[in-house]
């Protein structure tokens, strides 16, 4: 689930074009390349916020493409966005593969022009098809810092790490041997979240029961049909058990739930704009285990039941495993997820305050709340201004 900040940090109006006099008199220009999905964009923006906290005279410019979420997320956080051509890597031999060298050359040329025009002092990449042309354009010209959020590094970051002066990763054994493990940069609205202090307001905001144990359910920005189908049919059982539910089912999906008068409500919503309040309202969460999701629920100490996305190269299961090993989460495969599984696994967990408290402490112990500031120091050390 995209977790757009409710009260975003604003960097203020910034002109992305700098003169030679600007370069001398102003602080460093940090270019972040993390477009496409929220999993790439949010760490980049969290780093941007941390850089501005450490160096208010700095400038941060984001690279993106027309096809990603960055067109919405980056301007909303107050940072200038420069568009470059995407360089997606075909997964199968197709005509697109034959066009790749030409596409890469064109993207590098345009990206290099952007880096020169904004006066980039360092390029920080977070993977994906925005990062690859940024790495290749900066190679040998501008220092590169790479951050890998997933438990298994993608192709772009594997390429970028070969040229980088610093490499950071969220977890050990990401496939980038030189990486320093720092966690995932998270925005301040998450790392500074006090769930207990915000709980009453959060419950009112969503129309939840003020004191009943409450389960948060979401499956990514578009929802997850398997999660919806496993949880929604149990609405009346949750109610009779005295458990409230906040369920983000996805904007293209709908769920029909049976409410029981006087019982804790089951609240279905298409999307969660206020993830900070959703985390504060909940006692536990059932969700996918994307890298950002795992980092956020761990940082706020929310007990979790992870249901890894069954596609890809298995990185979602790897992302959640350290929290499971620490005792802060359970893991259920998408294939075995069912109403019966939710009834047998999730409901007993919500019914045990002692278990929830122990899991919360264990989850929080695996988090890296300071990752954004740590990465910002690494980046600014590389610049040396």
Image (spheres, grey):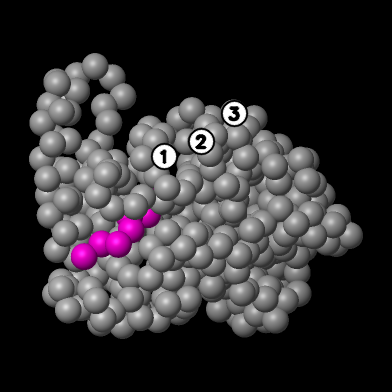
On screen, residue 250 versus residue 183, left or right, reads: left
Marking on residue 225: none
- Residue tagged by mark 3? 335
Between label 1 and label 3, give the one nearer the viewer: 1
Q: Is residue 195 visible?
A: yes
Extreme residue toward the right, this view: 354
Out of 16 and 286, give the one closest to the viewer: 16
Report the Cα–Cα distance between label 1 and label 3: 35 Å
- Residue tagged by mark 1? 161
Q: Quadrant of residue 362?
A: bottom right
Task: Count the marks.
Answer: 3
Q: Quadrant of residue 251?
A: bottom left
| Placement of 257 over or under 177, stated as above or below | below
Residue positioned 10% across, 40% down in the render: 106
| Placement of 364 over or under 162, stated as above or below | below
SS at mark 3? loop
Report the Cα–Cα distance between label 2 and label 3: 31 Å
Question: Magenta includes 125?
Answer: yes
Q: Is residue 338 visible?
A: no
Residue positioned 57% across, 47% down in the render: 180
On screen, residue 120 versus residue 202, left or right, reads: left
SS at mark 2? loop
Extreme residue toward the top, this view: 93
Out of 314 and 137, give the one closest to the viewer: 137
- Residue tagged by mark 2? 176
Question: Magenta includes 189?
Answer: no
């Amino acid at each position: 689930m995209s977790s757009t900040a409710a009260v975003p940090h604003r960097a203020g109006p910034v002109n992305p074009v700098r003169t030679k006099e600007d370069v001398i008199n102003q602080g460093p220009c940090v270019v972040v390349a993390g477009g496409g999905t929220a999993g790439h964009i949010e760490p980049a923006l969290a780093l941007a916020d941390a850089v501005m906290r450490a160096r208010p005279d700095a400038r941060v410019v984001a690279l993106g493409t027309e096809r990603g979420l960055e067109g919405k997320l980056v301007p909303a956080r107050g940072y200038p966005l420069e568009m470059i051509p995407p360089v997606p890597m075909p997964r199968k031999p197709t005509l697109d593969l034959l066009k790749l060298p030409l596409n890469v050359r064109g993207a590098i040329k345009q990206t290099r022009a952007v880096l020169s025009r904004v006066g980039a002092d360092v390029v920080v990449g977070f993977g994906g098809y925005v990062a690859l042309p940024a790495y290749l354009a900066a190679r040998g010209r501008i220092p590169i810092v790479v951050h890998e959020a997933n438990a298994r590094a993608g192709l772009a970051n594997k390429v970028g790490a070969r040229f980088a002066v610093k490499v950071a990763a969220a977890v050990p054994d990401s496939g980038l041997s030189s990486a320093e493990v720092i966690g995932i940069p998270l925005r301040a609205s998450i790392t500074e979240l006090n769930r207990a202090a915000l709980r009453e307001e959060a419950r009112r905001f969503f129309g939840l029961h003020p004191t009943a144990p409450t389960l948060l359910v979401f499956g990514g920005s578009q929802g997850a049909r398997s999660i919806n189908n496993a949880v929604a049919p149990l609405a009346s059982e949750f109610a009779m058990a005295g458990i409230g539910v906040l369920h983000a089912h996805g904007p293209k999906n709908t769920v029909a739930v049976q409410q029981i008068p006087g019982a804790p409500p089951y609240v279905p919503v298409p999307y969660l704009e206020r993830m900070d309040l959703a985390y504060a309202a909940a006692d536990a969460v059932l969700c996918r285990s994307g890298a950002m999701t795992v980092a956020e629920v761990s940082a706020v100490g929310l007990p979790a039941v992870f249901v890894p996305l069954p596609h890809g190269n298995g990185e979602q299961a790897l992302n959640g495993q350290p929290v499971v090993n620490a005792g802060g989460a359970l893991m259920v495969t998408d294939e075995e997820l069912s109403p019966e599984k939710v009834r047998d696994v999730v409901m007993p967990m919500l019914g045990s305050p002692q278990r929830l408290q122990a899991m919360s402490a264990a989850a929080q112990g695996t988090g890296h709340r300071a990752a954004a500031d740590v990465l910002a120091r690494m980046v600014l050390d590389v610049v040396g201004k």
